[in-house]
């Protein structure tokens, strides 16, 4: 691991994981806002983070100074059941006083994923005033195949030097941040829960297997936050 620091946090269960996540966001928000006036987060999609987003809706955060981005998006309309934006909107954004101008969904309406990917890269460049986004907290999940965001094994997205590119999940287009963008983050948090992830967590943390999630080595901090079920096959945790 390159970056500033690396750590693994294992919490007993989902509830404790969520409370830890809220505590960290509150701490990081204070730091970020005092440094540059806003706290930027990139949300991951899928099912795991939903309970976290729902809990964040009840947390004390300076929402008027929180900027929300996404790490990846399915190439569907914003109101589609598969949309990562829709999931976060329903679980969190509709339930907190965050200005619409602070929310930056990945566009999916140009009818051409590359056009939308390029547009998002421009948005990030404008907000961060830099070719790559130095996001304060980039949340990521992992799939059983070791993908993260929409960086899937064996796809061209893994080699992109742009900040945002078109991902490919079995032929379905995605919009995704790339390694250069993810690795520019001030911190990346892998947020992983459930026994179904125990094998991939063990593989990613104990073996060099060249899977996409292992390509995430941010300039900032790399933090793995798991519940005990997802960490159960790690050597030390498995003994506890
Ligand atoms: C997506 C995600 C993806 C997700 C993993 C894990 O758009 O689906 O960004 O990378 O984080 O596939 O998904 P689960 O949390 O549903 O297991």
Image: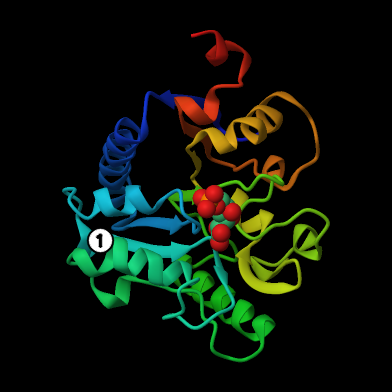
Residue 197 x/y as whole percent:
58, 37
Compare residues 44 and 47 and report the one nearer the observer. 47
Please indicate, yes or no, whether residue 184 appears anywhere in the rendered image: no
Q: Quadrant of the N terminus?
A: top right
Q: In the visual, does 5 lie left or right of 35?
A: right
Q: In the visual, does 30 lie left or right of 203?
A: left
Compare residues 229 and 28 and report the one nearer the observer. 229
Please indicate, yes or no, whether residue 75 appears anywhere in the rendered image: yes
Q: In the visual, does 159 lie left or right of 18?
A: right
The relative height of residue 36 versus residue 168 in the rendered view (above or below) is above
Residue in the image at 62% along x and 77% along y: 117
The relative height of residue 219 versus residue 133 in the rendered view (above or below) is above
Name the outermost residue toward the top: 239
Residue 95 x/y as whole percent:
20, 65
Name the outermost residue toward the bottom: 111
Compare residues 95 and 228 and report the one nearer the observer. 228
Where is mark 1, residue-wise? 65
The relative height of residue 203 versus residue 176 in the rendered view (above or below) is above
Compare residues 189 and 150 and report the one nearer the observer. 150
Residue in the image at 68% along x and 50% along y: 147
Of the four image quadrants, the one with ligand 1 is: bottom right
Give the quarter of the image for residue 216. Answer: top right
How was this image coloured? rainbow
Residue 123 x/y as whole percent:
50, 76
Q: How many marks?
A: 1
Residue in the image at 47% along x and 37% along y: 193
Residue 34 x/y as whole percent:
26, 48
Give the quarter of the image for residue 74. Answer: bottom right
Q: Secondary structure at mark 1?
A: helix
């Amino acid at each position: 691991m390159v970056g500033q620091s690396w750590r693994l946090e294992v919490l007993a269960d989902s509830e404790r994981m969520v409370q830890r996540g809220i505590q960290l966001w509150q701490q990081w928000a204070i730091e970020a806002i005092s440094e540059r006036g806003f706290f930027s987060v990139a949300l991951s999609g899928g099912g795991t983070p939903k309970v976290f987003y729902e809990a964040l809706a009840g947390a004390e955060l300076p929402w008027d100074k929180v900027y929300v981005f996404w790490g990846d998006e399915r190439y569907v309309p914003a109101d589609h059941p598969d949309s990562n934006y829709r999931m976060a909107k329903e679980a969190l954004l509709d339930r907190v006083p965050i200005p619409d101008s602070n929310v930056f969904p990945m566009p999916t309406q140009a009818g051409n994923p590359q056009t939308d990917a390029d547009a998002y890269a421009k948005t990030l460049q404008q907000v961060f005033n830099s070719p790559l986004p130095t996001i304060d907290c980039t949340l990521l999940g992992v799939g059983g195949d070791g993908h993260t965001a929409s960086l899937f094994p064996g796809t061209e997205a893994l080699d992109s030097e742009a900040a945002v590119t078109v991902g490919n999940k079995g032929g379905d287009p995605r919009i995704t941040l790339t390694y250069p963008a993810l690795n520019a983050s001030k911190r990346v948090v892998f947020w992983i829960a459930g026994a179904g992830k125990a094998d991939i967590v063990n593989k990613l943390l104990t073996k060099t297997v060249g899977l996409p999630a292992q390509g995430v080595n941010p300039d900032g901090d790399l933090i793995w936050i798991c519940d005990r079920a997802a960490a159960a096959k790690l050597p030390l945790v498995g003994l506890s």
